[in-house]
Image (cartoon, grey):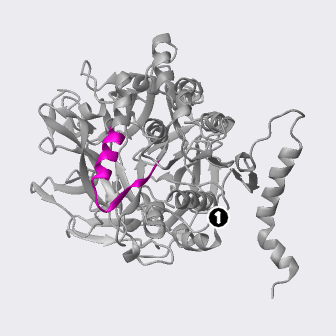
Amino acid sequence: MLHHKSLMSRFLPGARLLAAAWLSLACAPPGAAAQPLSRVPLREERGEVILEGASPVDSRLAERIAPYTETRAATFLAWLPDGAMLIGTRFADTEQIHRVAAPLGLREQLTYLSDPVTAAAAPQVAGAGFAFLMDHDGDENAQVYSYRLADRSIRPLTSGQARHGALVWSKDGRHLAFYGSERNAASDDIYVDDLDVPGGGPHLVVAGQPGTWVPLDWSIDGKTLLVEQSLSLEDCHLYLADVATGGITPVDPGGPKAGIRSARFAPDGRGIYLVSDQGGEFAELRYLDPVTHQTRDLTSSIPWDVTAFDASADGRYVAYVVDEDGLSRLTVLDTRYELEMSPPGLPQGVISTLQFDRTGRRLALTAESPESPRDVYVFDAERNQLVRWTHSEPGPMSESAFVPAELIHFPTWDRVGVRRRTLSAYLYLPRTPGPHPVLIDIHGGEAAQFRPTFDPFIQLVVNELGYAVVAPDVRGSSGYGKTFLGLDDGKLRGDAVRDIGSLLVWIDLQHDLDSRHVAVMGRSYGGYLALAALADYNDRLRGGIDFAGITDFASFLEETAPYRRDGLRAQYGDERALETREFLDALSPLGRTRWIRRPLLVVQGLNDPRVPPTQSEQLVATLRSRGDDVWYLAVKDEGHDFGRKSDRDAYYRVAATFLQSLAQ
């Protein structure tokens, strides 16, 4: 028999919430109209997590969720000169830097910091250590730190509220270049730190120019930096920067506007390898001679974007990754024998972070699939052999429990010429018989793409809640050419929402999907699309999840981090112009809340510099003033994404509880 104290402890959280609700009614001002008890937002704070208006998590559901929160992943960060590598992985609450010396070897933890560390760079010089980036509580104001392997000491190279990124070491390991916003919050300038100079520090190299500036590579002699100026996604330029004087010389003067994904000096010391969409629909890998301005296309026959590349130190091997409808394909060119190699055995998913080691024979990369967590592999180009270096744990589950992602295509409401346009999506189906409730998962970032990576939350929703998850690439997504990327620009913004309507029609025609129980969710720009879909198709949706979504475009553009405003205005329009502001107001979910009549979960990191918390707060307040069913999850120590396991766990539990209620 349970003791009285034990029995009370089981129901105490719910009792506190109920008491708080009655107290809020009892303390209402005289004459105020009393809300129904069900409409009073109940507030709970557990550490850094704030929860309002949500139903309690069922203990049995919590037990089923727990295994999905224990999954781990590994990301390649950098080769060390001794042949070991740095990886990022999590063993406690946050991802930290580890050293791995051999395939499937011990993960030796090097950093033990409270914030996640997910970016590092190491020079190929013995004893030099490495540098890494770390922000605080997700504020994205990353600072640069130096790590000495000899004594494991950490020294900050920057300080303050400025943001930094793109760590690039000189070939001799004496100089570190990066960008920073110390000069003003709206500009990213280029700095160099001469680490072997006593009492030195970062000094400004390139500044006072419009746009965002990023260092890409050092010349062999260490006198020149290859840098990129970005005015927008479609307007980027390469320059050679003299490190001593700060003078810049355009690499390709007078060239047309183009998007540049990446670039670096070729090992021959003369040319430049770059990935650009100049003159075509897709981002191609090219070799450019900056003296003659002649280019040689290496991937022009491939009708997809190149997403990553690297070249060996001697120039013999060039590796690149192509994004084929969301899936990655790796090719390694042997330039000596003019051969192409495609390493077998990689997961069928997404490949990233390519880097050859100092010998130029071993290529490290990160690979993952919907059914296998992110891990590090090494391809030995001389032996044509792939070796797995890490084996991350999928939690207390077998990888066989995870469902695959199926590439599907669905027709839209418009045509391309005489044919109906089709869009791509990935479908995750439960192994149980249907029809299944459906969750439409819309990717964040207007100019981004859904990629079939390992996502524990999707696997949880499919396996434990019985949902089918469909993740579309609506117009404006990247990966399908420049024309497709621009189909939602300016006054065409609403056309992307109409694509969600087309997907709902497709769902209605599938016998194994339950069109009466469809929910929608999205992050950031995807959050905007989810809210807009709830307004336009409220009779066909059961509810939605908005994770840091844009709710009011004008105030979003005014309040987002200063360094983002010009680029975003190029995409969405300049809210300072009256006509544009009126259009943005008509487009914004905040002005259309009277049509959002379905249950909604709003999730927000309170340190988010991209989508300010006020976007979520004003939406929640507006809906609640009307008595709508709104759950609100806010986290004090997170930004645009949740980097701490404890915070992700809280989100998983609340979101799963919310979706379970919608499926009933």
Kindly identify which residue carries mark 1.
57
Q: Residue 267: image x %, image y %? A: 26, 45
Q: Residue 520: image x %, image y %? A: 45, 48
Looking at the image, residue 525 sits to the left or right of residue 49; the answer is: left
Q: Residue at x 48, y 61 (%)?
A: 457
Q: Residue 103: image x %, image y %? A: 38, 74
Q: Residue at x 78, y 63 (%)?
A: 13
Q: Residue at x 85, y 83 (%)?
A: 3
User: The N terminus lies in which quarter of the figure?
Assistant: bottom right
The answer to whether residue 452 of the structure is visible from this angle is yes
Residue kind at label 1, given as amino acid type? Val
Q: Residue at x 45, y 16 (%)?
A: 580
Can you tell which quarter of the image residue 399 is in?
bottom left
Disc tally is 1
Which one is nearer the viewer's eye here, 223 or 290?
290
Which one is nearer the viewer's eye here, 95 or 602?
602
Other residues around mark 1 within 10 Å, as few (<14) / some (14–19) / many (≥20): some
Above/below status of 61 relative to 178: below
Give, as a single range, the part of the protein colored magenta. 499-520
Looking at the image, residue 36 sits to the left or right of residue 333; the answer is: right
Q: Secondary structure at mark 1?
A: loop
Q: Is residue 99 magenta?
A: no
Farthest-out residue, bottom: 1
